[in-house]
Image (cartoon, grey):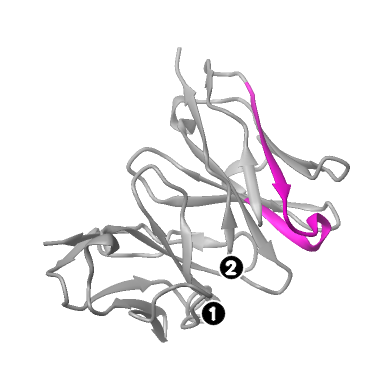
Amino acid sequence: QVQLVQSGAEVKKPGASVKVSCKASGYSFTNYYVHWVRQAPGQGLECMGVINPGGDTNYAQNFQGRVTMTRDTSTTTVYMELGSLKSEDTAVYYCAREGVGAYNFDSWGQGTLVVVSS
Amino acid sequence: QSALTQPRSVSGSPGQSVTISCTGTSSDVGSYNYVSWYQQHPGKAPKLIIYDVSKRPSGVPDRFSGSKSGNTASLTISGLQAEDEADYSCCSYAGSPYVFGTGTKVTVL
């Protein structure tokens, strides 16, 4: 079955970086987009960006210059690195799969809590 | 891109129907029939329940239905059940990236 398994919770200091992983299994890795979506405490979902089947990326304007998404096809793992962390970046970060031409997120990782605190 | 606007909360008794609105603009909801809805229980990841405005993935009960008129999409839950108590978020394609709604908490009285 389709699974997206994310890395564990992180605690970081302001100004630091965090790298979250998302290991995919149960489907053809190179046929799907992977998006990163975050949810701050008590807030709604927010798209951060996407990495497409060819490995190209598209980042939301709010995160331009601070976020980098990469993938390793040999381990079917996608990574999201967010730098210059601020307290407002405290959130649960999700990876989510989108089929080519699907325009929806049909499978999600379990989420990774990132806490930014001095 | 600004978040799509949803009511903060709606409630209903078991068996009743509730409708959640999702208001966007002519650049997102109004331009594309790619509105999806997600159900999220506390501490859990979102789950896709409606896609392409009104289609249901396999396994989603038919008491969940979606529609769209102009810049506003809607999710209706008919025959409300206790397990439907959760947060619901809409999402629209708007080029890349996508834009989500502000989220609605559904309470079953």
Answer whether residue A28 is magenta in the image.
yes
Image point (25%, 64%), residue name: B7
Q: Tell me: A6 left or right of A69.
A: left
Image point (45%, 74%), residue name: B25
What's the chain of the residue with tag 2?
Answer: A
Image point (58%, 67%), residue name: A104
Q: Which quadrant would residue A52 be assigned to in this image?
A: bottom right
Which residues make up the magenta segment? Answer: A17-35
The residue labelled by disc 2 is: A104
Q: Is residue A51 visible?
A: yes
Q: Amino acid at mark 1?
A: Asp
Comparing B62 with B48, the one in front is B62
Query: Can you say whether A83 is above or below B86 in the image?
Result: above
Pointer 2 and pointer 1: residues touching (CB < 8 Å)?
Answer: yes
Label 1: how many Cα within 10 Å (few below 14, some 14–19, many 20+):
some
Count of labels in the image = 2
The quadrant of the image that shows the C terminus of chain B is bottom left
Element marked by disc 2: loop
Label 2: how many Cα within 10 Å (few below 14, some 14–19, many 20+):
many
Q: Amino acid at mark 2?
A: Asn
The residue labelled by disc 1 is: B52
Q: Tell me: B99 left or right of B66.
A: right
